[in-house]
């Protein structure tokens, strides 16, 4: 199979899943719902986060499917971003308008899922930046 252009990362708080088996069940559910054009490429747990990697040519389409099968409780503890398969700079997709930098892991003491961290997300996009 040809390599995909993008890597989508579904990131959840490290303590979101009650057990390793619950995380694997979520990963398998993602794989079952995603069409064969998206490939769930595994996971990584540590540094306060759980990351599930999806290789895709259409990160927005994969993001929409992930959001469709997520619950509100999941969405509150989830971040989604993508990058070029060869790149290092992430583009945030969820939460919308999230200006915080995305990474696989964060420095000690920084919790991107803490309520105080989310207060920095603007309620509206700045004028002149609305997507067409």
Image (cartoon, rainbow, N blue to C red):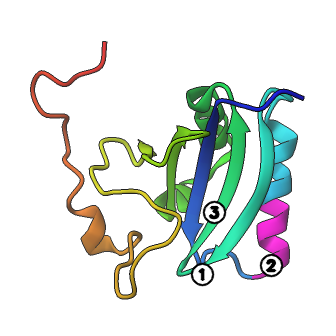
CA–CA distance in space, label 2 to label 3: 13 Å
Residue at mark 2: 20
Q: Secondary structure at mark 3?
A: strand
Residue at position x 61%, y 43% in the image: 8
Q: Is residue 73 above or below residue 88?
A: below
Is residue 68 in the magenta section?
A: no
CA–CA distance in space, label 1 to label 3: 12 Å
Residue at mark 1: 15
Q: Main secondary structure of the magenta part?
A: helix
Residue at position x 86%, y 29% in the image: 36
Q: Secondary structure at mark 2?
A: helix
Looking at the image, can residue 30 be seen? no
Choose the circle earlier in sequence order: 2 or 1: 1
Residue at mark 3: 51
Mark 1 Cα shell of 10 Å, populated few (<14), some (14-19), many (≥20):
few
Depth check, mark 1 against mark 3: the one in front is 3
Task: Please identify the quarter of the rendering in which residue 64 is found.
Answer: top right
Q: Quadrant of the C terminus?
A: top left
Instruction: Please report the bounds of the magenta region as a residue range.
Output: 19-26
110 left or right, relative to 31: left
């Amino acid at each position: 199979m040809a390599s995909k252009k993008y890597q989508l990362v579904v990131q959840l708080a490290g303590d979101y899943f009650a057990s390793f088996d619950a995380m694997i069940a979520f990963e398998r559910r993602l794989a079952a719902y995603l069409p064969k054009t998206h490939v769930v490429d595994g996971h990584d747990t540590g540094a306060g986060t759980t990351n599930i990697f999806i290789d895709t040519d259409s990160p927005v389409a994969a993001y929409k499917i992930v959001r469709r099968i997520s619950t509100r409780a999941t969405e509150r503890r989830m971040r989604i971003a993508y990058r070029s398969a060869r790149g290092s700079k992430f583009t945030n997709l969820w939460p919308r308008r999230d200006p915080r930098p995305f990474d696989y892991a964060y420095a000690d003491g920084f919790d991107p899922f803490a309520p105080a961290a989310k207060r920095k997300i603007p309620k509206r996009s700045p004028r002149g930046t609305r997507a067409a």
